[in-house]
């Protein structure tokens, strides 16, 4: 199914979902949890890279304004060489606002034991459970060894046709299927679409190792098959993350981010609850 902007925005339910961004005010964790129900159980969140032009405090407040609570933290908001005490403060700052840092990345690893452990300590200290990483095939044996010391999952990110390491999620899947089950993939659907691959079919083929799904385009515009993808994630009872990574309009990203989240809310409400969920 190929989607156009006009067909995506025609439903009244969707129009209602794409509400204006309100002024910042403290929201309770219960209010944010209630908001999660609009996504029919999908763990929809935001990659902080979307708000890379803003300080961390403002980024967290903007997440509340957008009505989501799951955050994938990028090191632009907290350096990898930060201290455990600094990480604990950031974790507490997020929790005080009812937000949850669930993943970190993309973190580009080196074939070095100490550097990998520094990265995974960072993720662990922030209370996250997933490290989204960039690696080469040569690093996989060491990664397989190091991750066994942590109660974390590693999601290898694909970067499309220009990526000389892992352009496609299928290549990640083939490379890690013999490794520890904690090592999986983060499918960037924008980059994967540029590979001329069937996104829904890729989800089906990799779902046992799919720990994070990222969108780096305005959701609801262009030709990405968002509706079939959301339907498949619901059908397969996907329990990983679905993070919005919005790279456009870096100086004023909130309107586009609100539209993207509004589209997903409206589309999922329009689908209704699928049998078996």
Image (tube, helix red, strand yellow):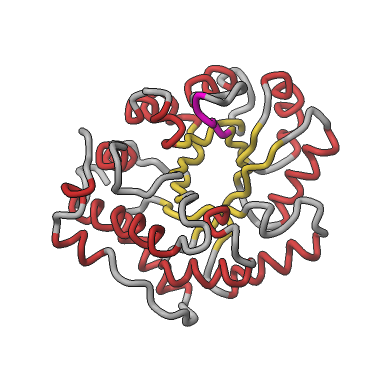
Q: Nearer the viewer, residue 154 or 200?
A: 200
- Residue 226: image location, x then y, percent: 30, 41
Q: Nearer the viewer, residue 9 or 244?
A: 9
Instruction: Answer with left or right where residue 72 lies relative to residue 214.
Output: right
State the residue at coordinates (54%, 31%). Answer: 159
- Residue 120: image location, x then y, percent: 73, 44
Q: For residue 163, which quarter of the picture? A: top right
Position above or below: 193 against 240: above
State the residue at coordinates (26%, 37%). Answer: 228
Helix, strand or loop: magenta stretch? loop
Q: Was residue 178 drawn as part of the magenta stretch in this picture?
A: no
In magenta, the rendered stretch is 157-161
Position above or below: 277 against 186: below
State the residue at coordinates (31%, 53%). Answer: 264
State the residue at coordinates (60%, 44%). Answer: 130
Q: Nearer the viewer, residue 69 or 254?
A: 254
- Residue 72: image location, x then y, percent: 56, 53
Q: Was residue 158 drawn as part of the magenta stretch in this picture?
A: yes
- Residue 274: image location, x then y, percent: 21, 45
């Amino acid at each position: 199914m190929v989607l156009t902007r006009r067909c995506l925005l025609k439903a009244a339910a969707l129009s209602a979902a794409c509400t204006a961004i309100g002024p910042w005010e403290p929201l309770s964790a219960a209010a944010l949890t209630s908001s999660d129900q609009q996504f029919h159980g999908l763990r929809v969140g935001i990659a902080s890279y979307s708000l890379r032009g803003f300080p961390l405090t403002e980024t967290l407040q903007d997440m509340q304004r957008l009505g989501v609570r799951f955050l994938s933290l990028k090191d632009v908001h907290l350096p990898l060489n930060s201290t455990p005490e600094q990480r604990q403060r950031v974790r507490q700052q997020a929790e005080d606002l009812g937000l949850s840092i669930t993943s970190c990345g993309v973190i580009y690893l080196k074939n070095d034991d100490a550097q990998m452990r520094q990265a995974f300590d960072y993720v662990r200290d922030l209370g996250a459970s997933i490290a989204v990483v960039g690696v080469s095939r040569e690093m996989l044996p060491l990664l397989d060894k190091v991750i066994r010391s942590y109660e974390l999952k590693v999601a290898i990110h694909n970067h499309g046709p220009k990526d000389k390491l892992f352009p496609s999620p299928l290549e990640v899947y083939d490379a890690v299927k013999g490794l520890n089950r904690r090592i999986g993939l983060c499918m960037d659907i924008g980059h994967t679409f540029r590979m001329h691959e069937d996104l829904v079919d890729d989800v089906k083929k990799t779902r046992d190792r799919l720990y994070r799904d990222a969108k780096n385009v305005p959701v609801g515009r262009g030709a990405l098959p968002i509706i079939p993808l959301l339907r498949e994630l619901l059908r397969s009872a996907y329990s990983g993350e679905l993070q919005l990574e919005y790279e456009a309009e870096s100086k004023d990203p909130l309107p586009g981010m609100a539209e993207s989240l509004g589209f997903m809310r409206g589309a999922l409400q329009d689908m209704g609850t699928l049998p078996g969920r």
